[in-house]
Image (tube, rainbow, N blue to C red):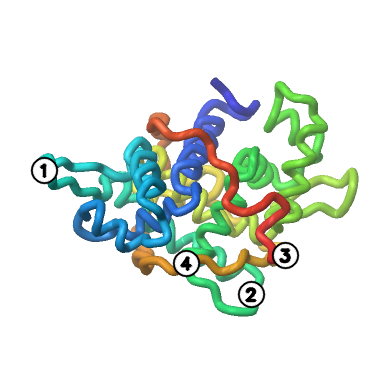
Amino acid sequence: MAITALPPDTDADIARVTEALAMITPRWNVRILLALSGPPLRYSELAAKVPWLQNGQLHLKLNSLCDAGLVERTEHTTRHVTYGHTERGVALLPVLPMIVTWAEEHLEKADLPLPAIEQIEDSLTLLTRRHAAAILWVLKSREEVSGRALARIVMPSSDWTNIYPPLRQLVFDGLVDTDGMGQPYRLSAAGDGLGPVLGTLSAWSAGQPLDQAAQHPVWGHPQAKPAPRAWISSQSRPASTALPPTRTPQSPPAWHNGDLFSHATTARPKAALPAGGPRR
C-alpha cells in the first residue's frame, strides 16, 4: 500500500528506510548491537556489557532485535544459548560511523564532548519523526516546495494542513528551512548533509551493497550547501562500546531498486527524547 503520492519505487524506498530506522531507533538498541560486536555472547556476558538494563528489559530488547532480523539466538544445548549478529546486522554497522560524521558536522557543540553513541541516538530521534523521511525525500528531489504541494505528495489522503506540525518540527530540528509563513520549504545544510546516511540506509534495507549509496537516485546528488543551522544534543547517557570503523566505498555500480526488505518488527516506539527537539 502506497504511503505517499510519489512513484512506486520511491514510495517503497521511503517505506524501507522508515522501517529500518524503526528497527534501530528504540532506546538501547544501538548499544546492544554494538555490545554484540565480535563473537556471539551468552546472555550473562551480554548483560554484563549493558549493566544499566534490567534482565527483563534486555530480554525484550533481544526478542525485538531477533524479530527484526538483526540478532540471532543460537541454542547449542538447553543450557548454552548465545546471541550474535545476523549477516544483516553486521551489514548495518558501517552506517553508524556515518551518522557520527554527520552529527559532528551539524550538531551544535555541547558544553562537554558527547560520546559517539549519544550522537547516534540523538540523530536517529530526528529521523524517526512522523513523516520526516518522506518530507526530506521530496525536498531533496524538488529543492523548494510549498506546504500545500508538499501535503499533496506526502499525505495525499489527509487534510493538507496536517503537513504543518511535522514541517514545523523539522524546521525546529534544523533539517528544513523556510523564509517565513507562506514561503516554500527547502532542505537546510544539515538536512542535505544526511544524504550519505539515508542513501546507505536505503541500500542496506533493499539488500544492496552499501557502496551503492553514492548512486542513489535522490541522495546520491548533494546540493550546494546553504548556511548551517545547528541544534543542541541531549544530556549525557551511559557510555557504550566503541563504534566500528567507517568503510571506504569503492567505485559503486549502478543503482538498482531491490525488493522491499521487511522483517517483523515491534510497534513503532515513541522517540527517545521529548517532542520539541533534542535540546538541554
Check if mark 2's residue and mark 1's residue have beta carbons within 8 Å: no
What amino acid type is highlighted by mark number 2? Ala
- Residue at the extreme left: 77
Residue at numbered disc 2: 110
Q: Secondary structure at mark 4?
A: loop
Give coordinates of residue 168: x percent, y percent. Answer: 78, 47
Q: Secondary structure at mark 1?
A: strand
Nearest the viewer among 50 and 269 is 50
Residue at numbered disc 1: 76
Question: In front: mark 2 or mark 1?
Answer: 1
What amino acid type is highlighted by mark number 3? Arg
Q: Is residue 74 above or below residue 234?
A: above
Give coordinates of residue 150: x percent, y percent. Answer: 74, 36
Q: Residues within 10 Å of mark 3 (few under 14, many from 20)?
A: some
What amino acid type is highlighted by mark number 4? Pro
Give coordinates of residue 263: x percent, y percent. Answer: 38, 32
The first of marks 2 and 1 along the sequence is 1
Q: Is residue 221 above or below residue 116?
A: above
The first of marks 4 and 1 along the sequence is 1
Mark number displayed over residue 238: 4
